[in-house]
């Protein structure tokens, strides 16, 4: 009887253990806990701005800057012109010696501009030639080279203006006078030139000139002077003395 009771108790314990195992098999296995790591923080916008402010651009040697402060340039030009005085017995001269070649070039440019505004071409040419000879001996200065180029440009302009003035004087000396304009039967215009026996048309020659255009009140002449070609107008009734 005791053996039967022992077997029953043992059987009950086995059944209970089997039931517990079945329930544990069906239940989900909890996942292991994972600790989230905080994302790495990069530099802030303020830090980037601070780094930008620390950076300074250093241009390479000899690099020309294409951006100029126009207001500052005008201010410097006014200061340069203020250092120039008028000599009643001679041309404009600096009031004191200038050691810096850049400043010297600026002063010479101001002097040339003054003479050109007065149509004194020969004086401007003389100053330009002297400045180019003196400053051109200095090498290795990019800014100075640029100013010398400006001086040479003014020199060429003054030379062209001087030759044109001489050509104008030579043309005026021909004393050409247009007395009137007339139309021919074919519709082309003819010019009545004082002293000429007949009316002249385009491409006709008169006193070393060639007529290149005839307008309603003007005749244009081509005139050669010093191996250069110039074009001068003469209006009806106008002569060299009335200009």
Image: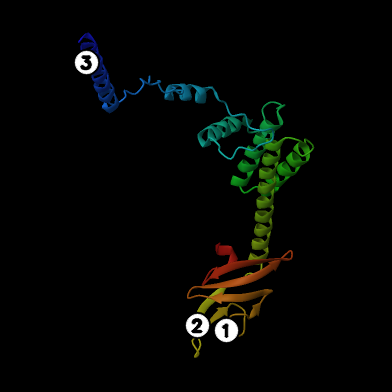
Q: Can you name the residue that lies furthest to the right here?
A: 137
Identify residue for label 1: 199
In contact (CB < 8 Å): disc 2 and disc 3: no
Q: Which residue appears at 24% of the width and 11% of the height? A: 3
The image quadrant of residue 109 is top right
Query: Which disc is residue 182 wearing?
Result: 2
The image quadrant of residue 30 is top left
Identify residue for label 3: 8
Q: Can you name the residue that lies furthest to the top here?
A: 2
The answer to whether 112 appears left or right of 190 in the picture is: right
Callout 3: helix, strand or loop? helix
Q: Quadrant of the N terminus?
A: top left
Query: Which disc is residue 92 wearing?
Result: none
Callout 1: helix, strand or loop? loop
> Spatial distance from mark 3 to mark 1, Cα to Cα?
155 Å
> Spatial distance from mark 2 to mark 1, Cα to Cα?
8 Å
Q: Mark 3 or 1, which is nearer the eye?
A: 3
In contact (CB < 8 Å): disc 2 and disc 1: yes
Question: Tag 2: Cα neighbours inside 10 Å, few (<14), some, or many (≥20)?
Answer: some
Relative to 234, residue 67 above or below: above
């Amino acid at each position: 009887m005791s053996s039967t009771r022992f077997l029953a108790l043992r059987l009950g314990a086995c059944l209970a253990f089997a039931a517990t195992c079945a329930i544990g098999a069906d239940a989900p296995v909890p996942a292991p806990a994972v600790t989230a790591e905080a994302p790495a923080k990069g530099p802030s916008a303020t830090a980037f701005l601070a780094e930008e402010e620390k950076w300074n651009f250093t241009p390479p040697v000899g690099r020309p800057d294409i951006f100029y402060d126009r207001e500052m340039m005008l201010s410097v030009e006014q200061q340069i012109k203020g250092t120039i005085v008028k000599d009643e017995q001679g041309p404009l001269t600096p009031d004191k010696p200038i050691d810096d070649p850049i400043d010297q070039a600026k002063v010479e440019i101001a002097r040339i501009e003054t003479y050109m505004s007065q149509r004194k071409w020969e004086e401007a040419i003389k100053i330009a030639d002297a400045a180019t000879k003196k400053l051109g001996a200095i090498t290795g200065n990019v800014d100075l080279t640029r100013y010398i180029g400006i001086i040479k440009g003014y020199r060429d302009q003054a030379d062209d203006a001087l030759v044109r003035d001489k050509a104008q004087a030579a043309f005026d000396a021909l004393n050409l006078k247009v007395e009137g304009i007339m139309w021919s039967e074919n519709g082309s215009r003819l010019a009545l030139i004082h002293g000429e026996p007949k009316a002249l048309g385009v491409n006709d020659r008169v006193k070393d000139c060639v007529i290149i255009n005839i307008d309603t009140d003007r005749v244009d002449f081509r005139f050669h002077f010093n191996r250069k070609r110039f074009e001068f107008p003469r209006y009806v009734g106008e002569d060299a003395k009335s200009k």
